[in-house]
Image (cartoon, rainbow, N blue to C red):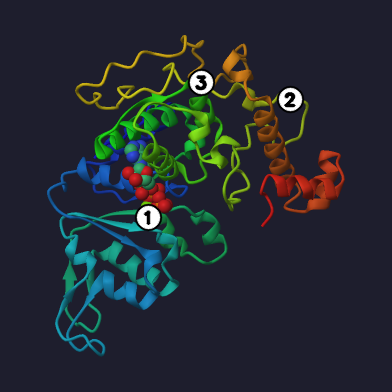
């Protein structure tokens, strides 16, 4: 399995993975949908002494409570109608290996209690069974929800929370790691070149800028799907902006996400006189997205080595803090798009500050409420 990253944030994640992998500690992986939680869990397993034993993944959101219990713990014959033979549950299947409990926040309170007991005692009973079964299982849990908040709301047991959050790893959303957008795009272009027998060389510099401006609400999964979709129609050369899906081009998300914090540049929550941070969207250190860029495999034999298309931009790479880099030509392109992006971010920030109250948000922004509503519609911020 390939783990593609170039960002400082993901380097930190990788080093956490490396440190915790060889231990038997329970790990809690958090992050938005599609950000790579399961990839992280699999890496932990693969880098642990349990790598030759099973990695068993179960999505707690996929089963209603009673079914999940049967899935996890198995059952004895006669436990319920139709239970004719003994069934080993996922805990047993993961013996000596790793059990990955995806969407752990979805466990109902009854199952949480049972689960806590297994974690504490490393033993359990099959449904309808008497015998205690001992298991040696390393647990990794994951969620895209705020577990602490669920604890406060009494929807998640506090004791279980502490048990599973021994070692938390947070996977940052893709929009906070532009370097990874570049590496992942290159990786997936290479991947689909192989899969579709094509020779796409990368993306144009303009396309790369679009990729960097888009907030990727679906994270890595969305980036992967986008590249796949574009590559169905192209066989070689570089991917041009007009080939990208419309919402990516306009920098507008398809669905308003539940997370109001999405892509609000640092410091903009308080409305203040400040130049739009987004105009300086961090350019990658590589001049263009090319197959063979960091972490991507070699281009297929026969394809000409792609020549960098754009003169190297000044190297912003890392968070420039307050020392602003001079804006490059690329930064200044697409004024309308950038202004739209900026407007949307500010509207979101105002709505957040106003706790969703539109009249209040309009007051903060100094515009009329119907103007705000019109613009919210335009940015698809309205349900
Ligand atoms: N750093 C990475 N390198 C390579 N591929 C990645 C990386 N991160 C994520 N992916 C890919 O992105 C997709 C989504 O990753 P994954 O399933 O791990 O996300 P998730 O956080 O578990 O999402 P969900 O919350 O929706 O279950 C997968 O195809 C995965 O292979
Ligand atoms: Mg997942």
Q: Distance between the residues labelled 3 and 1?
A: 37 Å
Name the residue: 41% across, 65% down. Answer: 61
Which part of the image, by quadrant, shows the N terminus? top left
Q: Mark 2 points at which residue?
A: 274
* Eye-nearest disc, 3 or 1: 3
Percent coordinates x, y for residue 93 in the rendering: 17, 64
Location of residue 168 (image quadrant): top left
Q: Residue 14's image quarter?
A: top left
Left or right: where 193 falls relative to 253:
left
- Reading the chain from its start, which is encountered first: label 2 or label 3? 2
Number of residues whose C-alpha sits closer than 10 Å to that of mark 3, classed few (under 14), some (14–19) or many (20 or more): many
Q: Which secondary structure lies at badge 1?
A: helix
The residue carrying mark 3 is: 283
Q: Is residue 94 left or right of residue 17?
A: left
User: With respect to residue 32, does 342 lie above or below?
Assistant: above
Horizontal side of residue 117 vs 352, given as left or right: left
Left or right of residue 87, residue 288 in this image = right
Name the foreground residue: 42 vs 281: 281
Tell which circle, 2 or 1, labels the residue nearer the N-terminal end: 1
Find residue 23 and report its horizontal and vertical position in percent: 24, 44
Q: Is mark 3 on a helix, strand or loop?
A: loop
User: Which element is circle 2 on?
Assistant: loop
The C terminus lies in which quarter of the figure?
bottom right
For image coordinates 14% across by 83% down, the residue present is: 85
The residue that disc 1 covers is: 164
**Is 291 situated above or below 220?**
above
């Amino acid at each position: 399995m390939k783990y593609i990253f170039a960002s400082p944030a993901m380097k930190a994640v990788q080093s956490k993975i490396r440190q915790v992998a060889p231990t038997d500690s329970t790990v809690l992986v958090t992050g938005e949908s599609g950000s790579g939680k399961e990839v992280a869990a699999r890496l932990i397993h693969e880098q642990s002494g349990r790598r030759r034993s099973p990695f068993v993944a179960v999505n707690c959101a996929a089963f209603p409570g009673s079914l999940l219990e049967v899935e996890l713990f198995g059952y004895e014959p006669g436990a319920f109608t139709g239970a004719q033979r003994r069934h080993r549950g996922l805990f047993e299947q993961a013996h000596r290996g790793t059990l990955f409990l995806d969407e752990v926040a979805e466990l109902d309170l009854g199952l949480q209690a049972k689960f806590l007991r297994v974690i504490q005692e490393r033993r359990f009973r099959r449904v309808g069974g008497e015998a205690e079964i001992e298991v040696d299982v390393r647990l990794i849990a994951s969620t895209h929800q705020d577990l602490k908040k669920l604890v406060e709301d009494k929807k998640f047991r506090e004791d279980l929370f502490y048990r599973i959050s021994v070692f938390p790893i947070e996977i940052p959303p893709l929009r906070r790691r532009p370097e990874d957008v570049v590496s992942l795009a290159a990786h997936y272009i290479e991947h689909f070149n192989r899969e579709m027998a094509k020779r796409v060389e990368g993306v144009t510099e303009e396309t790369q800028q679009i990729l960097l401006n888009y907030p990727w609400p679906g994270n890595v999964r969305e980036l992967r799907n986008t590249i796949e979709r574009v590559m169905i129609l192209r066989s070689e050369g570089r991917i041009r902006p007009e080939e990208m899906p419309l919402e990516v081009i306009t920098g507008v998300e398809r669905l308003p996400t539940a997370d109001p914090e999405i892509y609000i540049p640092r410091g903009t929550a308080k409305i203040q006189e400040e130049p739009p941070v987004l105009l300086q969207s961090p350019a990658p250190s590589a001049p263009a997205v090319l197959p063979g860029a960091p972490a991507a495999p070699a281009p297929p034999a026969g394809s000409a080595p792609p020549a960098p298309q754009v003169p190297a931009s000044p190297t912003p790479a890392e968070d420039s803090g307050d020392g602003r880099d001079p804006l490059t030509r690329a930064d200044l392109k697409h004024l309308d798009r950038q202004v739209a992006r900026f407007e949307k971010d500010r509207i979101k920030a105002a709505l957040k500050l106003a706790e969703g109250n539109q009249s209040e948000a309009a007051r903060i922004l100094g515009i009329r409420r119907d103007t705000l509503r019109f613009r919210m519609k335009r940015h698809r911020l309205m349900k």
